[in-house]
Image: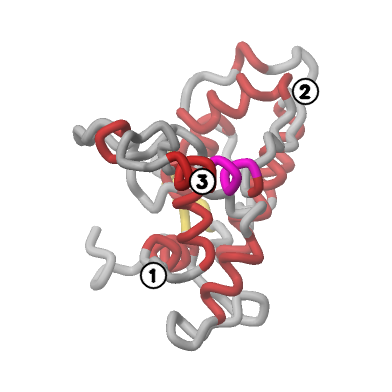
Amino acid sequence: MNFLTDPLPRSLNIHGVEYPIDTDFRTILRYDEELRNAEENMKDIRRCLKLVFTKKLPLDLEDAVGQMIWFIRGGKGEEKRHKPSKRILGINSNTPFDFHEDGELIYSAFRRNDVYGLDLRSVPYLHWWEFLAMVNDLPEDVQLSRVILYRTIDTGNKDLDKKQADYYRAMQRYYKLENRQMERNEGLIQALKEGRDITPYLERGE
């Protein structure tokens, strides 16, 4: 689809049937938050999906989750293009940012008049894909961009002198993202994110 000319999706196609969903960015963030805390059973996953699907839930919940993954990624699949080595780019494998942990930084960046001048707490509606596009285009001088740099810079890069490396290590410790995901749910959540079969991670009870 063409982002500029085509209507943004407001439903998900599951086995040929269109199921309306709530596409506001706040709803998708709530869904993501609830999914992180979901127990290992279909009852909890169904509860999470009910936050998004505005009418009835699809019978095939695994396919529904797969379609939600596609939607949350902005209609894009896994990145398959070859990327330069992270070591060459001077970055590490740390998570750059988190929509929940960094909520205040995202809000303040959007609120700035020289960026979008948009109050995310009071805007009536903003499609998730529009929100994603705007987050991805935040300028380098907002605090969130600086925090992302602190988290991802490779402190072992030889181009950094000792003073710089020590500074960035301190910033990484300060801005480190906590592991908010319960250990016992790691397999389930990873399978959901990758669109794999989640059956092996579920409890027998519904």
Q: Quadrant of the C terminus?
A: top right
Q: Give the residue pinned by disc 1.
A: 139
Q: Nearer the viewer, residue 51 or 163?
A: 163
Q: Nearer the viewer, mark 1 or mark 3?
A: 3
Q: CA–CA distance between discs 1 and 3? A: 20 Å
Q: Amino acid at mark 1?
A: Pro
Q: How many marks?
A: 3
Give me the disc on residue 168: 3
Q: Residue at x 68, y 54 (%)?
A: 30
Q: What secondary structure is the magenta-colored segment mainly?
A: helix
**Residue 50 locus on image (x, y percent):** 68, 48
Element on which disc 1 rests: loop
Magenta span includes 90: no
**Residue 130 locus on image (x, y percent):** 42, 68
Q: Residue at x 46, y 28 (%)?
A: 194
- Is 5 situated left or right of 204 in this image? left
Q: Nearer the viewer, residue 89 or 160?
A: 160
